DNA sequence: TTTGTAATGTTATAATATAACAATTCTACT
DNA sequence: AGTAGAATTGTTATATTATAACATTACAAA
């Protein structure tokens, strides 16, 4: 198997692509839906030897910091980024019927929000939007 | 003391403005910052007799359902709505320095997001945006 | 090698949230 | 008033999510 985009990223940045990190990212990437930390843990049984929560949370934090994983706060669950580039924050459409999520990954804050930020002289580091409802299949 | 807006709302809608609900809302409204459920619990000691988590969570759910309280998902904390009317979802600017939050309560989804929703034929029920960074005082 | 740093392992516990069922309170109707 | 039904609350227990603290190991640079 070829070197993954994430592994290449680590090589280029001088970051360590370790087994726990690789395994955790792999599980999240393979999940078709947002996956909770403890479900990641459960699916790592084969690949790591009796992993514990801190192992998972550390790896998730690492990948989130580098834009490969996002947290969907309203679900306490994680997804692999679908965009090909790092971006500030995350935006998702979440179906409350089937659990499917679609990443929107807007590169810019919408004008209505940007206006408020500017008015407040707020120094934004990240932003997230989570849109809930029913997808076309579920409604 | 006059009848609060929330109490009046309940009277008009035929909903029960009970002591646990009143007390929980009061604590959240008085908090200057987002407050966690267990902090609400701690501050209820005087007014209710040895309240337990379900009491708090039920009251919070009630008020969230009627638009008087919002949850800030990225903080696992709750705030009283600052808008004078019910609205779909919530939007906040959150300072990671001092913890201050400002409610934006846009009535309409920004165009960039609305476009995606329409394209996906998604039936939206609510949306939230949480913008993190440093406020003008903290930066 | 040694030496410092980053990463991981391990144990324990903190923090957040809900399930399940019993008891109570309220409302509407006789 | 009495009573049935529904809503709300009380209570116990437990589920779920996340982190603190410290020991150990792996790595990279000198
Ligand atoms: Zn992304
Ligand atoms: Zn769906
Ligand atoms: Zn509001
Ligand atoms: Zn601030």
Image (cartoon, coloured by chain):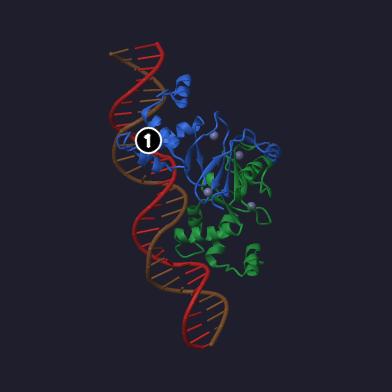
Chain colours: A blue, B green, C brown, D red
Q: Which part of the image, by quadrant, shows the C terminus of chain B?
A: top right
Q: Nearer the viewer, residue B35 or D8?
A: D8
Neighbour tally class for label 1: few under 14, some 14-19, many 20 plus, Cα within 10 Å = few
Residue corresponding to mark 1: A55
Q: Where in the figure is residue B11, as x and y percent of width and height?
A: 63, 69
Quadrant hosting residue A52: top left
Quadrant containing the N terminus of chain B is bottom right
Residue B87, given in percent of the width and then of the height, sits at: 65, 54
Q: Nearer the viewer, residue D29 or A77?
A: A77
Q: Position of residue A99 (x, y in %)?
A: 50, 47
A73 over B68 or under it: above or below: above
Q: Residue at x 47, y 40 (%)?
A: A78
| Left or right: C18, with B33 as reference point | left
D16 relative position to A130: left or right: left
Estimate the x, y position of residue C3 in percent, counting from the top left. 35, 17
Which residue does the image show at 61% across and 70% down from the upper left? B14
Furthest-front residue in this view: A137
Which picture quadrant has residue A27?
Answer: top left
As drawn, is A117 to the left or to the right of A57?
right
């Amino acid at each position: 198997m070829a070197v993954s985009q994430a592994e290449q990223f680590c090589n280029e940045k001088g970051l360590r692509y370790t087994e726990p990190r690789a395994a955790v990212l792999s599980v999240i990437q393979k999940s078709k839906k947002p996956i909770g930390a403890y479900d990641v843990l459960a699916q790592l049984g084969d690949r790591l030897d009796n992993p514990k929560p801190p192992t998972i949370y550390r790896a998730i934090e690492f990948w989130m910091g580098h834009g490969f994983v996002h947290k969907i706060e309203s679900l306490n669950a994680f997804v692999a980024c679908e965009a090909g580039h790092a971006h500030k924050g995350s935006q998702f459409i979440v179906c409350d019927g089937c659990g499917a999520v679609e990443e929107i990954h807007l590169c810019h804050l919408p004008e209505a929000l940007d206006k408020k930020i500017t008015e407040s002289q707020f120094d934004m580091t990240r932003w997230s939007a989570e849109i809930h409802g029913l997808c076309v299949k579920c409604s």
